[in-house]
Image (cartoon, rainbow, N blue to C red):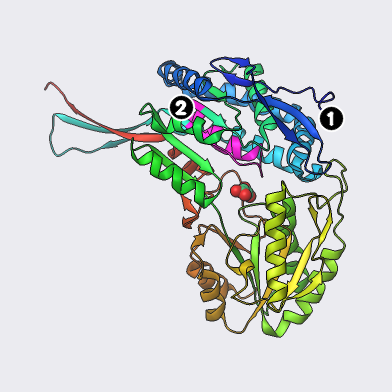
Amino acid sequence: MTTTFTGETRALIAGQFISTSSTFAVTNPYTGLEVARVADCGVSEAKTALEASTAAFTWWSKTTAYERAALLRKFFNLILRDEAEIASMIALEMGKPVSEALGEVRYAAGFVDWYAEEAKRVYGQTIPSQFAHKRLFAISQPVGAVYAVTPWNFPAAMVTRKLAPALAAGCTIVLKPAEQSPLTALKLATLWLEAGGHGDVFQVITTNDPVAVSKVFMEDDRIRKITFTGSTEVGKILTKQASDTLKRVSMELGGHAPYLVFADADIEQAVKDVITCKFRNAGQTCVCTNRVYVQRSIVDEFTQKLGEAVAQLKIGDPLESSTQIGPVVDSAGLEKIKRHVQDAVQKGATVVTGGAVQSGLVFQPTVLGNVSGEMLILQEETFGPVAPIIAFDTELEAISAANNTPFGLAAYLWTKDISRAMRVAERLEYGIIGLNDAVPSTVQAPFGGVKQSGYGREGGHWGLEEYLFTKFISFGMEQ
Ligand code: SIN
């Protein structure tokens, strides 16, 4: 495949695409074949990007919101123009089914569109003073140069969810995409340049040595913000590193989402919703449910219907438009899924459907019944296409089981009882609640977690505020 990939493979550093002496491979997880070789940047390229980013901040931060908005609009239109190409790139480099990847590209473009508008709405405040000669103002200003680290599971949307508000606010940004999926990020960089954007305002540093590269940015006082989406483990390391220079920090970390299905739910719809929530991207999203709690009186019917529907999901090549379940991203991901399923079965879970590797990195979409608390799958995030079902009796028991985790990103419930709906939604210790809704994420709403799922919010006006600080100006006038 290397010969047929025609997209950008060089890093965008200090205004231009550069080649490096060494490169690393991007592999199609479905075929196992190499797709492309990408620039493998090191400390020297990181230092160049750092200097360029901090220098560019001095002028970019002084552009008007209207100039930034116009540029973001052009960027948005170009992403939509090339949406099919970007969707195929996502399918190729990380295995997301292409029809789903197209949805991701539109979601990604939506952040650019939304923040193009929001750039114009960064308002300040005037505050009444107790002194006749004083005028008090609070204004918002960009925090500075930003370092962003993004994951492989949403190679486009996790980039624009950080990039668009940072640029809208007047920050410069150096992006380090995941090693598994740098091609989409580089494509976005080419579109940014085509839109007329500067390649030192937004830079992309590709590397197979993220620890050394990140250290350059994390140690430097001139990088004023780190934004990261990824594992809780790496998030904690970056947070500790950020403390030395007291950078602003946004952490979108792991989850372990419960889905509570009450006996009064619309069972057919709840089955569809659990499938959407659990099996999109082969279960590789931070907000995918990892534990499905079903009230005991309907658990048998629900399990049977879920099993039948999941068995119908079409497994195959992510580049084919009819595919619903593709491969997981790599062998480490696959091994974890196998370990969780084996452990559950050994401890008494029943395999309702699936339960094994189909071929290569493809794990069959799986439903497990009779799951209980001591199983690994209820303690760790699986990040794979496996839905474990646990029966519960009372509302309180379900809430307590759902909250019994160090994570707090997303939680879901299905009920027709409106009082229960609000009661449970308020008691779930999570940053995002899907109430009779399997896909709550949307560009204009806050996305983020509590507890060990991190802090900071992306999306909506909350996402822009992460890149702004409040300056207070007290003005003593001549009388
Ligand atoms: C994620 O997995 O972190 C993103 C999922 C989403 O935006 O819905």
In the picture, residue 470 is in which quadrant?
top left
Q: Which image quarter is the C terminus in?
A: top left
Q: Quadrant of the N terminus?
A: top right
Three-letter amino acid code at disc 2? Answer: Cys
Q: Is 189 on the left or on the right of 120, as rendered? A: right
Which range is magenta? 147-173
Name the spot of residue 392 as percent of width and height, x first.
Answer: 62, 81
Residue at 51% from the left image edge and 60% from the top image edge: 408
Q: Of callouts 2 and 1, which one flags the residue occurring earlier in the amino acid sequence? A: 1
Relative horizontal placement of residue 36, taking residue 44 as reference (left or right): right
| Position above or below: 358 against 419 | above
| Residue 191 percent coordinates (x, y) | 67, 22
Instruction: Give coordinates of residue 59: x percent, y percent.
Output: 43, 15
Q: Secondary structure at mark 2?
A: loop
Q: Nearer the viewer, mark 2 or mark 1?
A: 1
**Kind of residue indicated by mark 1:** Met
Q: Measuring 46% from the left and 57% from the top, which residue is drawn there? A: 450
Nearer to the camera, 425 or 249: 249
Residue assigned mark 1 = 1
Q: Is residue 371 magenta?
A: no
In the picture, residue 291 is in which quadrant? bottom right
Judge from the rendering whether residue 321 lies leftward or rightward of residue 38; answer left or right.
Answer: right
303 lies above or below 411:
below
